């Protein structure tokens, strides 16, 4: 059993790409649905484990914007599983003091999913334990483009009040005054993760070594950890091993540090 003695060295925010549900089921001659169902059980265990060891934020890549391209039958099953899990686990999440948050394109979710999820978000809003962030209908490129659109819209609205100027260098195109005020910090406020710290550790199960359009902006200096195990087989011990690996890394953020 891996032990964590100094909680000050823990990653504050752990993000996980939960990969391998379908392959887990295929290896056992089962339909993909059974892999997703088993994966929900793993979510329950890992949320509890994060609370036990003192992780502040846990972000789970639950349903990507690309997942909408999957067969309708599988998408419908995933949405049904999601609603059922939210309803079934509500009491335990409240008991464990878990606060549920969501990032992604909320409007694109089916109405029943939106309503059920919003109720859970509202009910857990006063909880002070693990912040469980569900990335639903989420894609990092969508998020960045959406942020840019919001900024442009706000600046153009200001332009209607006379805050636009002509630029001869741009052939008479409208140049927005105040653009120079946009920096990394202000841009981050337009992302769906506004108010959530960047992940310190990102874990991907299933043996693949890529980010798959997940938290691209936020993971600039995140420590990456890849494991061959499929998500349904991921255990608390695997989480602790990833955390121990994280503790052994030197995070310089582009700076030089004396050894």
Image (cartoon, helix red, strand yellow):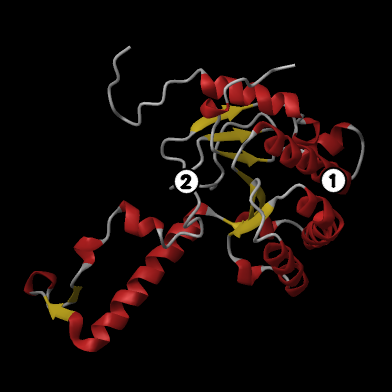
Residue at the spot x=61%, y=37% of the render? 55
Q: Earlier in the sequence, mark 1 or mark 2?
A: 1
Question: Which quarter of the rendering shows the C terminus?
Answer: top left
- Rendered view: 52 above or below 157: above
Tell me whether circle 1 and circle 2 mark residues in contact (CB < 8 Å). Answer: no
Residue at the spot x=12%, y=75% of the render? 171
- Circle 1 sits on which residue? 32
- Circle 2 sits on which residue? 216
Relative to 187, is 179 on the left or the right? left
Callout 1: few (<14), some (14-19), or many (20+) C-alpha neighbours within 10 Å? some
Mark 2 lies on a secondary structure that is loop
Q: What is the quadrant of residue 187 in the picture? A: bottom left
Question: Which sits in the foreground, 229 or 68?
Answer: 229
Q: What is the quadrant of residue 120 in the picture? A: bottom right
Mark 1 lies on a secondary structure that is helix
- Any mark on residue 147, and which? none
Question: Which quarter of the rendering shows the N terminus?
Answer: top right
Q: Where residue 116 sits in the image (x, y, percent)?
A: 77, 68
- Rendered view: 140 above or below 251: below
């Amino acid at each position: 059993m891996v032990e964590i003695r100094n909680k000050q060295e823990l990653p504050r925010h752990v993000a996980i790409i939960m990969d391998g549900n379908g392959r887990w089921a295929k290896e056992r001659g089962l339909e993909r649905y059974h892999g997703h169902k088993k994966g929900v059980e793993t979510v329950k265990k890992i949320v509890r484990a994060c609370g036990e060891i003192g992780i502040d934020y846990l972000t789970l890549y639950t349903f990507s914007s690309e997942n909408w391209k999957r067969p309708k039958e599988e998408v419908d099953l995933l949405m049904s599983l999601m609603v059922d899990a939210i309803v079934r686990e509500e009491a335990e999440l409240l008991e464990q003091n878990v606060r549920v948050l969501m990032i992604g394109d909320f409007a694109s979710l089916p109405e029943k999913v939106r309503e059920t999820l919003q109720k859970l978000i509202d009910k857990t809003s006063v909880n002070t334990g693990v912040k469980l962030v569900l990335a639903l209908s989420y894609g990092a490129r969508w998020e960045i483009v959406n942020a840019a659109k919001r900024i442009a819209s706000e600046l153009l609205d200001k332009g209607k009040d006379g805050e636009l100027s002509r630029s001869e260098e741009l052939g008479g195109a409208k140049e927005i005054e105040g653009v120079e005020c946009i920096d990394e910090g202000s841009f981050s406020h337009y992302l769906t993760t506004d108010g959530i710290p960047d992940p310190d550790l990102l874990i991907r199960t299933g043996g693949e070594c890529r980010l798959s359009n997940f938290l691209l902006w936020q993971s600039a200096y995140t420590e990456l950890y890849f494991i061959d195990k499929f998500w349904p087989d991921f255990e608390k011990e695997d989480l602790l091993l990833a955390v121990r690996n994280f503790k052994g890394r030197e995070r310089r953020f582009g700076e030089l540090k004396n050894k």
